[in-house]
Image: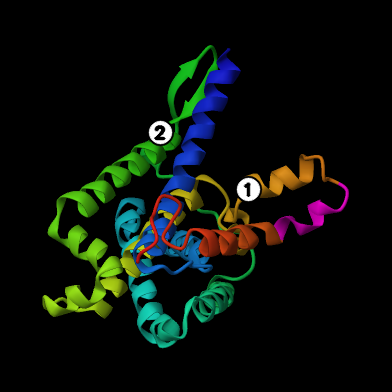
Amino acid sequence: MTFVVLTLLNGISYGLLLFLLSAGLTLIFSMMGVLNFAHASFYMLGAYLGYSLTGWVGFWWALLLAPCLVGAVGALCEHFLLRRVHRLGQVPELLMTFGMSYLILEVVQLVWGRSSLDFRVPLALDGPLFTLFGTQFPAYRAFMMAVALLMLLALWLLLKRTRIGLVIQAALTHPDMVQALGHNLPRVFAGVFAAGCALAGLAGVLGGAAFVTEPAMAASMGIPLAEQATHHGLWRLKLSQLAPVLPYVLMVLTLILRPRGLLGTRGD
């Protein structure tokens, strides 16, 4: 029973980390219609920036500053790269974000190298939250869960209860009206993209300290369930070789079948 409870809690903590990462991807996709293939790379960038900032200003400031820096990088990418191809349609946008993922990976490897980093949890959380029949549940895992839930609440309040959220939602469905009311539409989209990347960066700082900070961490955050299904499912013989491609196939199918999100509706 103890094993079941602790395994469940560990699974929930990891699932909430994935939620925090996917929340930024969903925000960008739902509000901009852009499927960001580089999202996991911003997650990786957040982990590396969090590691460096922790050495300079400590973990708690790194937890605040690293997502802001990742968001700033995302805003620059949107302004100088993504915006250039926005008028050309969704396929050029996909290709641009795909290229951005490789660019971020190369920059990370040039600056920090190809080896894994010794990114550790802060001393205040380096210990068990409780002990159940001799088995410990880490305090840092509980902290990850709390941060993810707080960000869920903050994101919901921002989109549903603030003027900024109303402008962001209106910019997707009625962009001409939003511009006619005096709002800077490109700035709105840049802010959305930056916010989505910042959420990925926050997940990167949390996940980088809890797990392994290395260049391969971006690729490992594709769609783990899809890969496991191919490795252990009925089509194990040859389909397992397609596992690395399946996340991108699912993203493209989602873009084609549900261009306004899984719960969205098509415009007229």
What amino acid does circle 1 point to? Pro
Q: Which quadrant would the N terminus be assigned to in this image? A: top right
Q: Eyeballing the image, is 215 above or below 93? A: above
Residue found at the far right of this picture: 237
Residue depicted at 45% across the width and 31% down the height: 127
User: Can residue 120 be seen at all in this image of the molecule?
Assistant: no
Residue 188 location (% of width, % of height): 25, 72
The one nearer the camera, 73 or 36, is 36
Does the magenta run of residues contain 238?
yes
| Mark 2 or 1, nearer chain start | 2
Residue 46 location (% of width, % of height): 44, 62
- Magenta residue span: 237-244
Does the magenta run of residues contain 195?
no
Q: Eyeballing the image, is 11 above or below 66? A: above
**SS at mark 2 in the image:** helix
Residue 82 location (% of width, % of height): 43, 81
Residue depicted at 48% across the width and 66% down the height: 35
Residue 63 location (% of width, % of height): 34, 54
Quickly name the residue at label 2: 142
| Residue 1 badge | none
Residue depicted at 41% across the width and 67% down the height: 33
Give the prevailing secondary structure in the magenta stretch: helix
What amino acid does circle 2 point to? Ala
Q: In the visual, does 111 lie left or right of 263?
A: right
Quadrant in the rendering for residue 147: top left
Residue depicted at 64% across the width and 63% down the height: 115
Q: Eyeballing the image, is 11 above or below 77? A: above
CA separation in Å, label 2 and label 1: 22 Å
Camera-nearest label, 2 or 1? 1
Quickly name the residue at label 1: 224
Q: Which quadrant would the C terminus be assigned to in this image? A: bottom left
Q: Eyeballing the image, is 22 above or below 180? A: above
